């Protein structure tokens, strides 16, 4: 019962470095999401993929890119990391459009990223 | 636009006390969904409940209960006889129609003191 798996769990970058956060789900969900969590601000949507082959911007997309590699995997890339991107990143997935799924999003354990 | 307000930033209670976490939402959608998630100190987000906009029945699950009132745009969460394991940050969230992405409140940190 892996659910949503995120790697890595922790990462420290220097300003200007790039990295990719990986996310994979094994629940046959069609929609996947990337959120960031900052103190006092709750979670905010960065990008989402409603279905395989599509991606759309969320509330805070600047400085990020995403790739929906296949139905299972949705990666988030920081091309040139900035201190403002220090945050905890969560990936989530859901079976959108299916009443029985109730639009419930299931979350990974998070990636704690520090940009120095 | 979707918005969720959790006015209580932090709450502390003594074990076995009841506690209510408030959630007020704004949306123009006629069909929408409300959620509560728990984030324990370990950091993961745990789904607790989902309620859709056309079902105003209150729900009880063990020591947890939820009161959904469309008239006041509120979806409050009550923990009865709180326990130390209930200590966590609790998020209320809203999803409209469309992409189903969640709009989160800023969370309420609950500390249960033994």
Image (cartoon, rainbow, N blue to C red):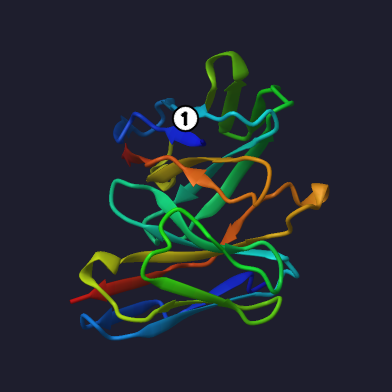
Q: Position of residue B35 (x, y in %)?
A: 58, 40
Q: Quadrant of residue A24?
A: bottom right
Q: Quadrant of residue A9?
A: bottom left
In the image: residue B93, left or right of residue A102: left
In this orientation, does residue A31 appear?
Answer: yes
Name, please, the residue furthest toward the left: A116
Q: Position of residue A72 (x, y in %)?
A: 68, 77
Q: Quadrant of residue B59?
A: top right
In the image: residue B106, left or right of residue B100: left
Up/down of A57 relative to B47, above or below = below
Indicate the quadrant containing the N terminus of chain A: top left, top right, bottom left or bottom right.
Answer: bottom right
Instruction: Report the front residue among B64 and A114.
Output: A114
Up/down of A36 relative to B54, above or below = below
Instruction: Report the front residue among A114 and A77.
Output: A77
In the image: residue A9, left or right of residue A39: right
Residue at image location 51% in from the left, 63% down from the top: A47
Q: Position of residue A57 (x, y in %)?
A: 51, 60
Label 1: chain?
Answer: B
Up/down of A111 relative to A58, above or below = below
Up/down of B95 relative to B56, above or below = below
Residue at image location 43% in from the left, 47% down from the top: B85
Residue at image location 24% in from the left, 83% down from the top: A16
Q: Position of residue A32 (x, y in %)?
A: 62, 65
In this orientation, does residue B79 appear?
Answer: no
Q: State the count of labels.
A: 1
Residue at image location 54% in from the left, 53% down from the top: B46
Residue at numbered disc 1: B81
The residue carrying pointer 1 sits among few (fewer than 14), some (14 to 19) or many (20 or more) residues within 10 Å by Cα, namely few
Q: Under tag 1, what secondary structure?
A: loop
Name, please, the residue furthest toward the top: B71
Indicate the quadrant containing the C terminus of chain A: top left, top right, bottom left or bottom right.
Answer: bottom left
In the image: residue A9, left or right of residue A12: right
């Amino acid at each position: 019962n892996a659910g949503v798996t995120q790697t890595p769990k922790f990462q420290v970058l220097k300003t200007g470095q790039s990295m990719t956060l990986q996310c994979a789900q094994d629940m046959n969900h069609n929609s996947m999401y990337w959120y960031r969590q900052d103190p006092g601000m709750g979670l905010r949507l960065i990008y989402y993929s409603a279905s395989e082959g599509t991606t759309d911007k969320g509330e805070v997309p600047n400085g990020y890119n995403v790739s929906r590699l296949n139905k299972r995997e949705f990666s988030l890339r920081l091309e040139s990391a900035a201190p403002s991107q220090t945050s905890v990143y969560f990936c989530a997935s859901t079976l959108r459009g299916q009443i029985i799924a109730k639009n419930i999003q299931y979350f990974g354990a998070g990636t704690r990223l520090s940009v120095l | 636009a979707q918005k969720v307000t959790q006015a209580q930033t932090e709450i502390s209670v003594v074990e076995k006390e009841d506690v209510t976490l408030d959630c007020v939402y704004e949306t123009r959608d006629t069909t929408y969904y409300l959620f509560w998630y728990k984030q324990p100190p370990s950091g993961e987000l745990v789904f607790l409940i989902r309620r859709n906009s056309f079902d105003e029945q209150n729900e009880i699950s063990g020591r947890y209960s939820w009161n959904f009132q469309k008239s006041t745009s509120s979806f409050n969460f009550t923990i009865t006889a709180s326990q130390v394991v209930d200590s966590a940050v609790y998020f209320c969230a809203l999803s409209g129609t469309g992409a189903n992405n969640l709009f989160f409140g800023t969370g309420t940190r609950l500390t249960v003191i033994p």
